[in-house]
Image: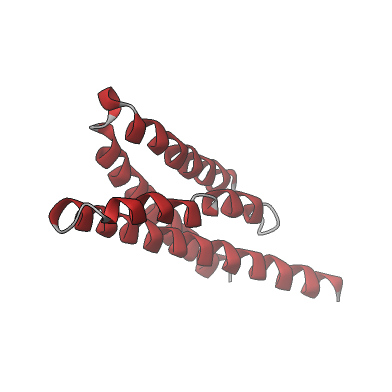
Amino acid sequence: MSDIKTNGRVRLFKMIFIVFAWALVACIALQTFIAGMAVFDDAEHWRQHVIFVHLFEFIPLLMLLFAFPAQLPKRFKWMSLTLFLLIYLQYFTANMPAAGAFHPVMALVLIVLALHVARLAQAFRKKAS
């Protein structure tokens, strides 16, 4: 009976990880859209761009935490940590003139890695079922 409870918990934590992973993808896409609105529509949107990141910047840390009870392989933990570090580095590229050109490039890396993690986690869940 305890194996059934354990398996159910592991599945639940995997599902939570996947939800966070896809939420991160959506947030990065929306953040990019807000930046585009600031560039092409109204510079007032930069304020929203700055504020919005604070709503999702810790999602990769939550993913890292949930990867352990979800019993996900180490690569998911490393990729979650990498996503967090990339978001953290975005603050430096946004506030250092010499590094500013790297800001949109790192955003591309973030969305690609976030998509990779979300798709890989979903495939891993299906494979494990």
Q: Nearer the viewer, residue 119 or 56?
A: 56
**Residue 17 in the figure: left or right of residue 107:** right
Query: Would you place residue 126 above or below residue 48 in this image?
Result: below
Residue in the picture at 78% in, 68% down: 6
> Looking at the image, how many numbered discs can be counted on the residues?
0
Q: Which of 44 and 117 is in front in this view?
A: 44
The answer to whether one can see residue 124 in this image is no
* Residue positioned most to the top: 98
**Residue 28 in the figure: left or right of residue 2:** left
Residue in the picture at 21% in, 58% down: 37
The answer to whether one can see residue 128 in this image is yes
Q: Which of 2 and 21 is in front in this view?
A: 21
- Find residue 106 and report its horizontal and vertical position in percent: 32, 39
Quarter placement of the C terminus: bottom right
Residue in the picture at 31% in, 45% down: 107
**Residue 44 in the figure: left or right of residue 122:** left
Q: How is the image coloured?
A: secondary structure
Quarter placement of the N terminus: bottom right
Q: Nearer the viewer, residue 52 or 16?
A: 52
Query: Would you place residue 92 above or below residue 40 in this image?
Result: above
Query: Would you place residue 111 above or below residue 93 in this image?
Result: below
- Find residue 117 and report its horizontal and vertical position in percent: 44, 54
Residue in the picture at 26% in, 59% down: 33
**Residue 2 in the figure: left or right of residue 53:** right
Q: Which of the 4 image quarters holds residue 24? A: bottom left
- Find residue 49 and report its horizontal and vertical position in percent: 34, 53
- Find residue 105 and report its horizontal and vertical position in percent: 26, 39
* Residue positioned most to the left: 40
